[in-house]
Amino acid sequence: MQKHSLIAVAVALLATGCTLAPHYQRPAAPVTATFPTGGVYDQQPGAQGARGANGLAAGDIGWRDFFVDPRLQQLIEIALKNNRDLRVSVLNMQASAAQYRIVRAGLFPTLDAAASQSRQRTPRDLLALPNGPTISNTYSVGLNASWEIDFFGRVQSLKDQALATYLGTAQARKSAEIALVSQVANQYMTVLELDDLLKVTQNTLKTAQESFRITKLQFDNGTGSELDLRQSQTVVETASADLQAQMRLRAQADNALVLLIGEPLPADLAPGLPLSDQSLLTDIPAGLPSDLLTRRPDIMEAEENLLAANANIGAARAAFFPKVTLTGSAGTLSPTLGGLFKPGSAAWSFAPSITLPIFEGGQNMANLDLANIEKNVQIATYEKAIQTAFREVADGLAARGTYDKQIAALERDVAAEQRRLDLSTLRYTSGVDSYLSVLTAQTSLYLAQQALVTARMERLQNLVTLYQALGGGWIEHNGDQPRPADAPVDYGAASAPVAASAATAG
């Protein structure tokens, strides 16, 4: 009767999921309730034509709707299928799912089939019967069972820890995919920037070479000075050196893009848009900092790691209490192989055991201290993840509010420098001014054009990074149902998540 009561209590405790883990309470967000306002933050651009976000949050905007360049869309699609870092994150997630199933198996009894044969010789002096046989055989066939009754939730806490760890790696995989979309887009913008810089440098070099040709002709005819000749040559050599450097950077940018997409650039890529025609959404609402808790997978990963550390405290506490294990076997036992299944050969054993820690040299206390310290570490990590996310969004908003005016000013500067060069050239050819004014105007125009190209690229990259920082890049089209964080590796596949059934069963 006592045995049946013990089993009933154990089943009741298991059904309620009793553990000694502390009650979890999400730490307060260590940031202000709103993003910064005033100054540059009040200069946010509105929707440009038909490319407005229409009030959609970043997480609800598909990357195909955010990026309109068909070439870029194709590159992102290839990267999501081939990128090796993304594959590693998926494999890490699958490994955590397997580890979770291993730990969860400890909640259930184990049942093994066993068959054995033993042969033993006993000295005649020790025989119970003086004339008995000295050699004996024992054959057995049966089932062995073992079960740790989780009275104090040790195994349950370990299972909760493994589940939270798995869910954390799933969020890490989601974060890796979102980051990959942003990385491909930013690298593509870098390639377009270098294309535009090459055009600027080639045009500057062509103009400088023509100017050098004229000044050299004047010098050869005795109507020009060597100073003018050498001054015009400096522009040619500077542009030539810049051209080689930019060609090198352009090739390296392609190599970086190849690494991201995980295969050589396909020959049948769709035609792309130039840097100036990359119409990205500029008016995505930032929302509140608290929204980042549900939009940012890196923050959710940090919280899952905190939950895992919290569950580990329950396992460390349970180590101070008795460990109850039930073991038993049932089968047949016979001194001969032929007699295994004859009447009267049935055999069974039942051996419950209780292990109570008395002296462990402080090991259990040290494990509990370690578990508490690790939880505090995860609390700080979680808070830092929130602060980092807040800073990334605030930086993006500050930049978004200033780039449009900066680019407009740079466009006016380029126009003014072009006019300055035209006037300086006219004054030089008229003999009113020296060639130094032409040289200075050429250099200033060249630098202004480079600054304008770079600012356009930085504006686009800031919009891409802000889209990522606000949690965008997980869905493909507006209105798509967001996939679970543990979605399969094949992008867009319709199969079930890796461990959805295991997590549900747990």
Image (spheres, rainbow, N blue to C red):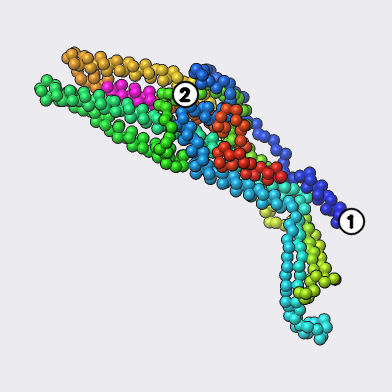
Image height of 36 relative to 366, above or below: above
Q: Position of residue 501 (x, y in %)?
A: 68, 44
Secondary structure at badge 2 equals loop
> Can you tell which of label 1 and label 2 is closer to the viewer?
2
Task: Name which residue lies at 79% across and 71% down.
Answer: 340
Q: Position of residue 275 (x, y in %)?
A: 41, 26
Say the numbered circle drawn on residue 394: none
Is 285 left, or right, of 413 in this rendering? right
Few, some or many residues within 10 Å of mark 1 (<14, 14–19, 20+) = few
In this view of the protein, can residue 301 be seen by the observer? no
In the image, 416 versus 105, the foreground residue is: 105
Q: In which quarter of the view is residue 496 placed?
A: top right
Residue 1 tag number: 1
Which residue corresponds to the image point at 24% horizontal and 28% vertical from the top-left? 236
In the rendered structure, which disc, 1 or 2, sits on the residue that comes first in sequence? 1
User: Of residues 263 and 221, which is closer to you in this image?
Assistant: 263
Secondary element under disc 1, as helix, strand or loop, is loop
Q: How many marks?
A: 2
Q: Nearer the viewer, residue 87 or 495?
A: 495
Q: Residue at 30% x, 32% y: name it.
A: 243
Most frequent secondary structure within the magenta stretch: helix
Q: Which residues are magenta?
A: 442-454
Of the residues shown, which amino acid type is indicated by label 2? Answer: Ser
The image shows residue 82 at horizontal and vertical percentages of 49, 42
Residue 169 is one of the magenta-drawn residues:
no
Circle on res. 279:
2
Disc 2 crowd rating (10 Å Cα; few below 14, some 14-19, many 20+) is some
Question: Measured along the vertical axis of the image, is residue 443 above or below residue 105?
Answer: above
Q: CA gap, disc 1 to disc 2?
A: 77 Å
Vertical arrangement, residue 326 with respect to residue 59, above or below: below
Q: Amino acid at mark 1?
A: Met
User: Residue 400 placed where, x, y %?
Assistant: 49, 23
